Amino acid sequence: MKIFELDIENVRGIPNLSLRPGGKNLVVWGLNGSGKSAVVDAIDFLLTGHISRLIGEGTGDISLAKHGHHILHKQEEAMVRALIKLDLVKEPIEIKRHMDKPTDVEINCEKDSKEFVEFVLWNAQRGQHVLARREILKYIHSEAGNRAKRIQELLNLSDIESIRGALVSVKHRAEEENRTSQHGVKVAEAAINQTVGEKSFSQQSILDYSNKNRKTLGGNALTKVTTINIQKDIRKPADSSNVIGMNSAQFDRVLENVNSEISPEQKEKRAIIDKKLRKIIQEIRSDKDSLKKSARLQLTQAGIRLIDTDGSCPLCDTPWKPGELLNYLKEKIKKGKQIAENNEAINEMCNELSSHFEQLSSSLKTLIQATAKIELVQEKALLVEWLKQLEGLSVLINNPIEKYPIQEEEIDIITNLKASKKIDQVLVNIKKVVKERVPDLTPELSAWTSLVQLTENLKALETAKVKLEQSNKYLKRATILHDSFHTARDKIMGVLYDTVRDRFVELYRQLHNEDESKFTAVLKPVGPALDFEVDFYNCGSHPPHALHSEGHQDSMGICLYLALAENLNKGLINLIILDDVVMSVDNEHRKKLCSLLSTSFPEKQFIITTHDRTWANQLKAEGLVKSNELIEFNNWNIDTGPQVSYDVILWDKIAECLGKGDVPNAAFYLRRGLESFFCETCDSLEASIKYNIQQKWELGDWCPAVLKQYRNLVKQGKNAANSWSDEEALKKLDEREKISAAIFETSQAEQWNINEEVHYNSWKDSQKEDFYPVVEAFKDLCSLFECSKCGCKLKVVSADKEKTNVRCSCGNENWNLTEKRKN
Amino acid sequence: MSKEEEEDTSKPIPDQIFEEMISDVRKHPEFDTELVKKVEKLYANGGLQKATKIIETIIPELES
């Protein structure tokens, strides 16, 4: 895709602007605040529906709806239109987007092409075509862990990170669920062990226990026990348990549990635990930092269990190299060893207390039901109140560091478990009434009750196993998706990064061949992170911002971007927008960058903005743009936006001034324009000027030096043509010599080195009619150093430090400087 | 590079990753053809731009 026409209405700082790049490169230059970045914003909006500068980090309350349109106009008045051409579509296509409907793009093209155009625009939506300096810094300066993320952001590949984050979260969720399910199975097995009276779980114990009880009830022995056959062919014996909802043996066990928890032995054990807990918790609470450290440590310990296999942070999904985060957290835990030990002790003691609380609460609930059935109203009320108090205590020991009771007046709370002083008497009363109403168990009833209990336990185990099976399946699928994604990502991104690295190295070597011709780089994904290191003058690989200068870093950023963009667009979008990207690059390397852009990316359309006039002129001098493709923005104001001047070479400006009779201004522009022109021509023709320590030169230095060098080059060309007997070349150079001698004479350019000010003053003090011929003479003079066909400056080409040719970018001008060797 | 490979590399990177992932997922018996089709359909309708949404939609399928 290339842009042929661009119309901007009321976007950012531009009220109205029409540009006609015609599919060619375009350079927009202007001082800061001249409105040039609004052109980038407008193209960005047209292709993506958003403006990159208004989104992302640090943009806070800024939005497209509020700040995308011109401040003096309404959102619905803002629009961007372009006429574009695609490689595979013959006819030009008109696309248009309005600010009040940013998601809708109007496409006017042949019906048959519409699907393809939509596909290209869908690709363009990713915004890969814009590079601004802030993006360069992002991925040159990023830590390895964030570099992949940064590059993905730059190239709008954040989907990859987004889906990775989602898959990691899914896997974590599946692992958590799987752990819970495994715990559920263990709890169900423990309940069975308690019922059958064994310490460890085994099918044989269940079988033996079942057959023993079945035998009491006259049933056959089973070879395998299931919830379906355990009660097969046996009948429930006569039962009196409906009086209180359980038989006397069960009731005795419940009562025994309660009595045991409030026995002096248990109280003593709790008192010891309580004392230890108070001491540790008191110490922690007296040190505020310790509380913080303790909370952090708990978070760290929880975090370690959740670290993903690729090493990423489970909390924020930030990528880490495998094992790095684990080691980091382990080190953190090691440092807080005392805190860790305290935390561990607190957890252990609280867990013990908690298990007793739960057991007592469970027994109390059963007793409350029994007292309700035999209508022991007062006893029931007392038990209900006790249970409530116990539940309150459970809350305290679940968060001991903050809530555990440590005040003097609270000293008995844990030891006595808030039991009423009347509790012993109440339990005796309940037992007495129950004994009167519920007869002792018969062996048959005992066997039946045991089998019923075991059946319930087995059902619970079955349910827990089904849940575990489901969670295993879920975890397996989540792991497959997670692993497949990571493998696929590493493979695809690995191939991409290898290709990009090679191209990056090639481009960077072209820019810095004078001293880094053996430059190499490492661009390697490590898990979700991206290692990026570059060679520093054969002294090993280092991060790009470790040793290289800012200018080199900018060069690397541009080369890396160009290499990435080339690999990701694959000819669909031939547009690259470079928004002020060479701020730290020196003149010499800017010049090489011009050549790199035109020679390595001839198929691309570059739209380049810059606040630097020299760089703008270099882009022209090196042939990346012609005069009419170089646009100057100046005199921006809020009502009219930027004032646009095409062709900064300034002949039009001079003509405009003379048209108004303003000779002093025309003289000023001519002097400044010639200074710029001859400075660049000195460079392109490799003319020598006298060195001065202030490094300050003027037209009087540059102009005569250029003329002298030009004469030498023509002479050298003629000698070469003579040696090769190239009559045609000789004729052309003779002609050139004759014309140039006349022009030199008319312009009196060489006299500038005698007295610059006198010369200049004579210009600005002259009349309009007298100044016209001066302008024309210098216009002719300048034309000597440019190609009449492509408009580019003539340039000396060297090989092995020997000047071989003088040529322009298109090759229309090409003089050989090398003489034929004499035998 | 063959024409097929060239076509492959001209696809957006997220698409390439997704297709590679699906081709690996197919090899696992835990994902039947129908489930893979559902995932592909979700992707075709939304692209990876809606990655999180897709994953959230896939999860109930995984849990069932």
Image: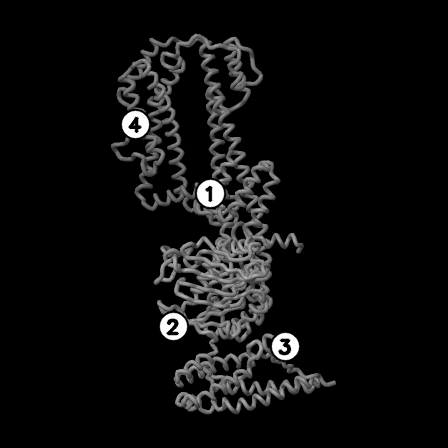
Amino acid on which the number 1 mark rests in the picture:
Ile
Q: Mark 1 sits on what residue? A: A304
Mark 4–mark 3 distance (CA, rounded to whole Å): 95 Å
**Three-letter amino acid code at the position of disc 3:** Ala
Q: CA distance from mark 1 to mark 2?
A: 60 Å
Provide the residue designation for mark 3. A799
Image coordinates of residue A727 in percent, x first then y, are 69, 86
Q: Secondary structure at mark 4?
A: helix
In contact (CB < 8 Å): disc 2 and disc 4: no
Residue A783 in which image quadrant: bottom right
Q: Is residue A85 above or below residue A261?
A: below
Is residue A694 in view from this perspective? no
Residue drawn at (54%, 51%) of the image:
A526
Q: Residue at x 39, y 28 (%)?
A: A355
Q: Are marks 1 and 3 on the same chain?
A: yes
Tell me the amino acid under the disc marked 4.
Gln
Picture residue at 34% right of the left edge, 12% below the top: A434
Residue A763 percent across, percent down from the top left: 42, 89
Distance from the alpha carbon under mark 2 to that under mark 4: 80 Å
In this view of the protein, which residue sits in the foreground, B55 or A77? Answer: A77
